[in-house]
Image (cartoon, helix red, strand yellow):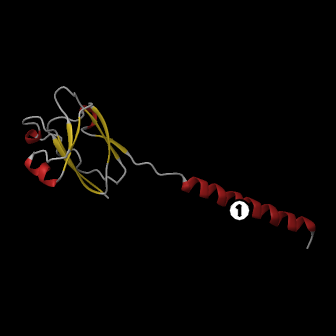
Amino acid sequence: MSSEGRGSAGRAMLLIMVAVIYLLIQYSAPVHGATYTVGGSVGWTFNSANWPKGKRFRAGDVLAFNYDSKVHNVVAVNAGGYSSCTTPAGAKVYQSGKEQIKLVKGQNFFICNYAGHCESGMKIAVNAV
């Protein structure tokens, strides 16, 4: 075997190792969830209950709630609070007008607990897989 043949094999092996290292670096980077703006361009408002339909959410995705904090809020509730439009004891209430809430695996429920708002469809249920 000539020395030129062994050099070509060495270069090929080096290229393969570089490619493997590159792929390891690319696929070991942390995966970030998607960000969804609740209600789209109109934001968190009345009749939002159908907004999640047709979307696929994953644990770690972020819901961006944009709203007028003088007249609305966001409350993370359980299934009972969602269906009855009530705020359970200990529920997390957000009031900044610009919330970024990370979804957990399973059902995630949010309402506005200002009088009559949840009953007017200002609530969403999101299932994150």
Classify residue 49 by image quadrant: top left
Please provide percent x and percent y for residue 39. Answer: 24, 38
Mark 1 belongs to which amino acid? Ile
Q: Which residue is mark 1?
A: 16
Left or right: 78 with respect to 115? right
Which residue does the image show at 11% across and 35% down from the upper left? 114
Please provide percent x and percent y for residue 126. Answer: 24, 51
Left or right: 32 with respect to 47? right
Quarter placement of the C terminus: bottom left
Q: Would you call the spot at circle 1 few (<14 residues within 10 Å), some (14-19), or many (20 or more)?
A: few
Residue lying furthest bottom = 1
Which residue does the image show at 13% across and 44% down from the upper left? 87
Which residue does the image show at 61% across and 57% down from the upper left? 23
Please provide percent x and percent y for residue 75. Answer: 20, 42
Which residue does the image show at 19% across and 45% down from the upper left? 91
Pick the front one: 4 or 64: 64
Please provide percent x and percent y for residue 51. Answer: 22, 44
Question: Dot 1: what SS?
Answer: helix
Residue lying furthest top = 70
Classify residue 4 by image quadrant: bottom right
